[in-house]
Image (spheres, rainbow, N blue to C red):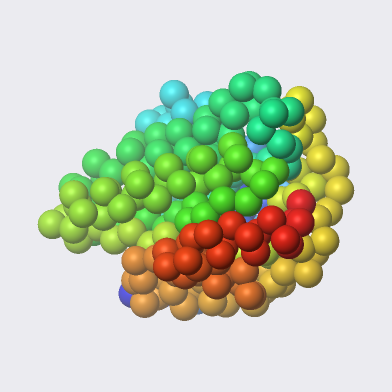
Amino acid sequence: MNFNNKVVWITGASSGIGKELAIQLSQKNCQLILSSRTVSVLEEVKILCNNPEKVAVLSLDLADYQSMETVVEKAWNLFGTLDVLVNNGGISQRSLISETSIEVDKKLMDVDYLGTVALSKALLPYFIKKKNGHFVTVTSLMGKFGSPYRSSYCGAKHALHGFFDVLRMEHEKDDIKVTLICPGFVNTNIAKNALTGNGSLQGTQDTATENGLSPKDFCTRMVRAIEREKFEVYIGKKEVLGVYLKRFFPKLLHRFVLKSKVR
């Protein structure tokens, strides 16, 4: 897949992975739609892009999944088409199961799973009619195995894998592609913005997150995976080995994760 002259819609584009991805894709002669809840911050990202006249901003709240059909219609009309949706928006969590209110579990599912699914389902008829399209969904290594303090986040990310694997199967006949991007630790504000058990923000950085890949390195590898139309790709440092340990040596992974004491 070549990004040249494509229209790419990125959610969660105001910071971190989404922001860096927008900057890198703007160098590939494509048109971009940047979405998050805060339009003013998106305008700042737009200025950092090459050819900002080819970049549009569109407000999007993933928790408001009842409004997705209207949002998709607006996005489609900005450039008259869409080629790639990058489902990058979402939130994380840092709290023990026993200390996490059910409202926090629901919030993670509403934003990370249902919001992403509702947006994708609203766009799907357009891709079917066009007989072409590419869903790129940023999940996590936590969508492949678990880690303490992330139960709600793991649940939502595991659910995304189930949904998008089926979407890929059902709509291969429509030339619709699905790429699942599974980050390990990336040095963004995801930990600072993570919800604690009572729904408040953690407000501090995790050591593992701070020592993770830079958004620039991560997005360089992510762009390459999208261009190659990969089904699923794991991007990180040594934590990527957890995917294979989970598959072949689940008890060994269990011991490693507990020993690591990652927060």
- Residue depicted at 49% across the width and 60% down the height: 250
Q: Position of residue 22 (x, y in %)?
A: 59, 63
Q: Is residue 27 above or below residue 95?
A: below
Question: Of 182 and 75, which appears nearest the observer?
Answer: 182
Question: Of 114 and 32, which appears nearest the observer?
Answer: 114
Tell me if residue 249 can be seen: yes
Q: Is residue 5 left or right of residue 205?
A: left
Tell me if residue 16 can be seen: no
- Residue depicted at 33% across the width and 59% down the height: 178
- Residue with the most extreme left position: 173
Query: Toward which corner of the image does residue 233 lie, by quadrant?
Result: bottom left
- Residue depicted at 69% across the width and 28% down the height: 98
Q: Is residue 242 left or right of residue 3?
A: right
- Residue depicted at 52% across the width and 55% down the height: 145
The image quadrant where one finds the N terminus is bottom left
Question: Of 78 and 137, which appears nearest the observer?
Answer: 137
Q: Position of residue 222 (x, y in %)?
A: 51, 71
Q: Position of residue 107 (x, y in %)?
A: 60, 29
- Residue with the most extreme right position: 204
Query: Toward which corner of the image does residue 177 lie, by quadrant?
Result: bottom left
Q: How many callouts does the rendering have?
A: 0
Q: Position of residue 74 (x, y in %)?
A: 43, 38
Q: Is residue 91 left or right of residue 135?
A: right
